[in-house]
Amino acid sequence: MAIKLNDKFLNGFVGEHELGAIEDSVKSAHAKLHNKTGLGSDFLGWVDLPVNYNREEFDRIKAAAEKIKASCDILIVIGIGGSYLGARAAIEFCKSPYYNNLKKDTPDIYFAGCNISAQATAELLSICEGKDVCLNVISKSGTTTEPAIAFRIFRDMLIKKYGPDCIRDRVFITTDRQRGTLKAFADEMGCETFVVPDDCGGRFSVLTAVGLLPIAVAGIDIDAMMQGAADAREAYSVCDLAANDCYKYAAYRNILHNKGKKTEILVDYEPCMTMMNEWWKQLYGESEGKDNKGLFPASVVFTTDLHSLGQYIQDGERLIFETILSIADTGAVVTVPGDEANVDGLNFLTGKTLEYVNAMAYKGAVIAHTDGGVPAMILELDSRTAYDFGYMVYFFEKACGISGYILGVNPFNQPGVEAYKKNMFALLGKPGYEDAKAELEARIAD
Ligand code: PA5
């Protein structure tokens, strides 16, 4: 088992009987997920995805990754939200946050279309000068504004670099099986396409072509990743809180929420988790934050953030609990060197590994925070392999589905993300939004 839940630091915050009291809700959530009888049941493709994916497409993903590796220095992944966070999280977790600076035989990978920043776009255009470039455009709807604008800009760059015929060989498109402007574009230009399955929402799609193609280009073993997810699927199919840490995590979140906690902070001690935190925040924020309900998902990377948010966590309003993700083997050993002069007084650490020092920081912080009234759960992850990543993704996805059903929301829709788009389109003068434009402009003028 790649992940273990350690609930020792919930002592004094959650009693054994409270787990018993929520057990029926967990069972009902399990039945809804597995019998497809709950809200949003059209979007449960991710539940069996690790054992029920398109093998032919999986092989094409590997072949396309090889083609991309052979034909470019830079792969630009264009997408936003669920269409980019998973791949970026996997690359940083399994390889490094410094992936682009590593000595490697795989292309650098940059992400675009996840903002509308002129500065970020201009810098990436300049980084591409003199380099061979491929694009992987990812959008389920094919109409999302940010990636659509980025695709236009980087497509224009490719055409200026190589001429119009390059699009077929240098642009790889991941989108809906049949619908949408991207699909139509791909068909017209003859680009290779991959499918975002109908029954997987963006935030549940990292183990489809959405995540797997960029992940494979980075040289990460996607077979091992799917195996990790498949083993997690098996481990978390049993509806028994005592035997299912994934369900226990979902249960504890809801117990703590019901007791007045408003914010869950995902805490890690490794910067390679930074983008995984972002993926996790989207998963839980978009799945549970609706109907005026839901925990607010926040994250910190310690010890860095102990020097910024540490004060609030220790001493601020008592609305928070921590879920600490600790990685047993980070795959690196660095030892503190000796210094005869001992000018910094650090000789008590001579010969100690940074992993050891980090572990002591973690133990010190969790005791201090629980003493300060912040409950903590610990998720103990074995290591940073592709297998662990697949396992962890499935753990959090399944826990999210169960948790959302316990909360009483539809965990698989995201009605709230449309509101800003309508206003933005109106203000930009998109045809069809004329009335809203006048009204919004009047409100801004006021
Ligand atoms: O989880 C989601 O559904 C969203 O975050 C989407 O992934 C995001 O809005 C991008 O949508 P699309 O893939 O249609 O461009």
Image (cartoon, grey):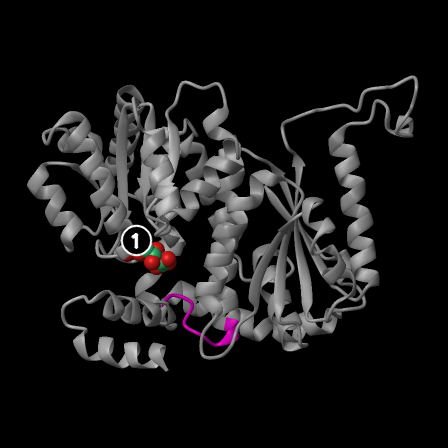
Q: Place residue 315 in its image quadrant.
A: bottom right
Question: Relative to the observer, which residue lies in front, 212 or 130?
Answer: 130
Q: Is residue 315 above or below residue 192?
A: below
Say left or right for 220 vs 52. Answer: right
Q: Is residue 354 visible?
A: yes
Say left or right for 315 vs 296. Answer: right
Which class describes the residues within 10 Å of circle 1: few (<14), some (14-19), or many (20+)? some
**Residue on which disc 1 sits:** 146
Say left or right for 157 vs 327. Answer: left
Q: Which residues are magenta?
A: 406-413
The residue positioned 48% from the left and 51% from the top of the image is 279
Q: Place residue 131 in its image quadrant.
A: top left
Magenta region includes residue 410: yes
Quadrant the C terminus occupies? bottom left
Q: Is residue 427 above or below residue 156?
A: below
The residue positioned 79% from the left and 61% from the top of the image is 370
Question: Residue 387: x and y, percent?
Answer: 50, 36
Q: Amino acid at mark 1?
A: Glu
**Helix, strand or loop under label 1:** helix
Question: Residue 208: x and y, percent?
Answer: 33, 45
Q: Is residue 178 visible?
A: no
Magenta region includes residue 106: no
The residue positioned 63% from the left and 77% from the top of the image is 258
The residue positioned 86% from the left and 19% from the top of the image is 338
Question: Residue 86: x and y, percent?
Answer: 43, 46
Question: Residue 18: x and y, percent?
Answer: 70, 73
Q: Is the stretch drawn in magenta largely helix, strand or loop?
A: loop
Question: Relative to the observer, which residue lies in front, 426 or 445?
Answer: 445
Q: Place residue 358 in its image quadrant.
A: top right
Q: Quadrant of ligand 1?
A: bottom left
